[in-house]
Amino acid sequence: LSERSYDLVIMMIRISDMDPLTLGRKIKKNFPKKPLVLLAFDDSEIKQLPKDISDSVDSIFLWSGNANLFPAIIKHIEDKKNIRRDIQIGDVRVIILIEDNPRDYSTILPMMYREIVFHAKNLLGSNSVNIDKTFYMRSRPKIMLAKNYEQGEKLFKKYQKNLLGIITDLRFPIRGVVDKKAGLKLAQSIRKKEKNIPILIQTTEITEDKTSDITEHIIDKKSPLFLKKLKKFMILNFG
């Protein structure tokens, strides 16, 4: 890293000669602005990590053999870095994903980015004359990932004017404590301010609460059709 410039560091959790968190802290100390992603292979490895590792890595992803995860990680980092400028220049749209489980967002993000890029390329193909292709692809919707209630609320307030929609888990932390209905509470708060924003709740525990005044879109994460239903929601609601 000291001899050559890199835009992103992806570090495997299994390093033979050094603890990955120690290495991450060393990299962060010398290159504080360098994005650093930790890649695990199963949930048990993640559970062994300390609760707060923000001084060592920026994000944790779980790789289960899906090659689409790597471009999704790159786009995730790009979106966080470029969103402010791209909104100022191109007034780009924003999708907020609230999900705290690395296994789940490591599955959801690749599908979401693949779908967004696919439709952006299709639109570019039909309007490719005299168009700056790089600028056009950068004008695709950005995906912002939140891992707790406070982050989700902050992203909503920050990008409310550019928001395409919300995809949220039902269970995630509020003030550091996992709340079984956090997604419902966040959706209720958002719905009071935005009556027409599409909101999808994805959960392993289908709630019996009345959600008709918040959203009609609820998907069972245990369903074998989960990703297909999520894709359908994006197509119908995000254009």
Image (spheres, rainbow, N blue to C red):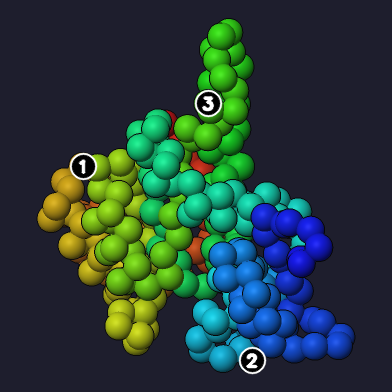
Q: Which residue is mark 2?
A: 48
> Disc 3 versus disc 1: distance between alpha carbons?
27 Å
CB under 8 Å between callouts 2 and 3? no
How far separated are the C-alphas under marks 2 and 1? Answer: 42 Å
The reply, left or right, for residue 85 in relation to residue 106 is: left
Badge 2 amino acid: Gln
- Upstream in sequence: badge 2 or badge 3: 2
Q: Nearer the viewer, mark 2 or mark 1?
A: 2
- Kindly identify which residue carries mark 3: 136
**Mark 1 highlights which residue?**
196
The image shows residue 15, relative to residue 39, as above or below, that is below
Instruction: Give me the residue at 16% from left, 46% from top.
Output: 195
The one of 74 and 86 positioned closer to us in this rendering: 86
- Measure the alpha-carbon separation of dots 2 and 3: 42 Å
Q: Position of residue 14 (x, y in %)?
A: 79, 81
Instruction: Name the residue located 36 percent from the left edge and 79 percent from the top edge.
Output: 173
In the rendered image, the quadrant that contains the C terminus is: top left
Q: Position of residue 217 (x, y in %)?
A: 34, 51
Q: Is residue 222 above or below residue 80?
A: below
Q: Residue visible at 43% across and 70% down?
A: 147
Q: Position of residue 34 (x, y in %)?
A: 61, 64
Taking 162 as reference, is 135 above or below it? above
